[in-house]
Amino acid sequence: MSQSVYPAFSRRRLLAGAGAGLSTLAVWGLSPLVESKSLPDTRPTIIGHRGAEGLAPPNTIASIKRALEVGVDGVELDVRRTSDGEFLLFHDPVLDWNSTGRGWIQNTPWSEIRGARIDGEPLVTLSDALEVLSETDVSLYLELKETGYTDAVLETVAEYGLRDRLTVIAFETEALEPAHNRGVTTGLIGSAPTSQLATDAADYGTDGAFCHYAPHLTSEFIEEVKAAGQTAGIWKLVDTKGTIRDALEAGPDVLVTNHPDYAFDELEQLEPTA
């Protein structure tokens, strides 16, 4: 049996990273921005977070279509598995938290979830989204919220001819390893832009590292990830034009944002005029 490409992932490290992320948000989340000098030479890839959560209910067809209308380079979606093996696009583990559905997703069959809504829009499966995206040329970022179903997700994506456009991202390397072994692009997620996350991503052999935006810390993180020859990604859960401008000026390779419309507006203003 071949040795795993990824070292064992410490659950303690995962919890510590989550704690660091919460601390970062608490301390830096509303702090004044660091003023940057100019727009980097290369425009980052703009990815709509959960479709385009700032423009339509997250992880819905409406959200995906709004992202496409804005002109995104790709979309990011959250994937969970129901009790009968269907792949549901939903962020939280419990349907009650953010939809009209009830129960834990992993314990509930799709037949009982079908028809539930989030802010008026129906919950949808991964296949529903892939059918829409197969008619486009945008990239696809899938965040696997749990381990154990990566291979099945890859097979589903392959059925729609989108595997070449796919990046699999997750907080746990166990969810990434099957994708890595099949030559699919992977990215390790961390809550905070720390040196440890950059080091872990390089050590684990992922293609990139993605973290939540935080003023004062983002630029150094991006530099460390790029120095390791990896893709540096920033995602944002709370977007304003000011924070998006700051994130863009830090020079990420990829920006995953609730408001891709803001990102394109800021890029136009940051681009030098002839």
Image: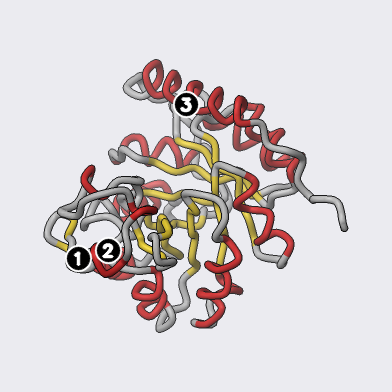
Query: Which of the image's four quarters has the N terminus?
Result: bottom right
Secondary structure category for the residue under label 2:
loop
Q: Are marks 2 and 3 in contact (CB under 8 Å)?
A: no
Q: Residue at x 63, y 33 (%)?
A: 197
For the image shown, how many numbered marks are present on the structure? 3
Q: Taking the image as drawn, is residue 251 in sight?
A: no
Dot 3 lies on which element?
Answer: helix
Residue 122, labelled with which disc?
Answer: 1
Going 51% across and 29% down the picture, which residue do you hit? 192
Classify residue 271 as left or right of residue 155: left
Disc 1 residue type? Pro
Mark before the other along the chain sequence, 2 or 3? 3
Q: Earlier in the sequence, mark 1 or mark 2?
A: 2
Instruction: Please tell me which residue is depicted at 49% across the width and 33% down the height of the picture.
Output: 191
As rendered, which of 212 and 218 lies closer to the eye?
Answer: 212
Tell me if residue 5 comes above or below residue 59 in the rendering.
above
Relative to 80, residue 15 above or below: above
Label 3: how many Cα within 10 Å (few below 14, some 14–19, many 20+): many
**Residue type marked 3:** Gly
CA gap, disc 1 to disc 3? Answer: 31 Å
Q: Which marked residue is nearer to the observer: mark 1 or mark 3?
A: 1
Q: Secondary structure at mark 1?
A: strand
Q: Residue furthest toward the top?
A: 27
Residue 251, given in percent of the width and then of the height, sits at 55, 42
Which residue is under mark 3? Answer: 21
Marks 1 and 2 sit apart, C-alpha to C-alpha, by: 7 Å
Q: Nearer the viewer, mark 1 or mark 2?
A: 1
User: Tags 1 and 2 in contact by the CB under 8 Å rule?
Assistant: yes
Using the image, determine if residue 161 lies above or below residue 93.
below
Q: Which residue is mark 2?
A: 60
Q: Are marks 1 and 3 in contact (CB under 8 Å)?
A: no
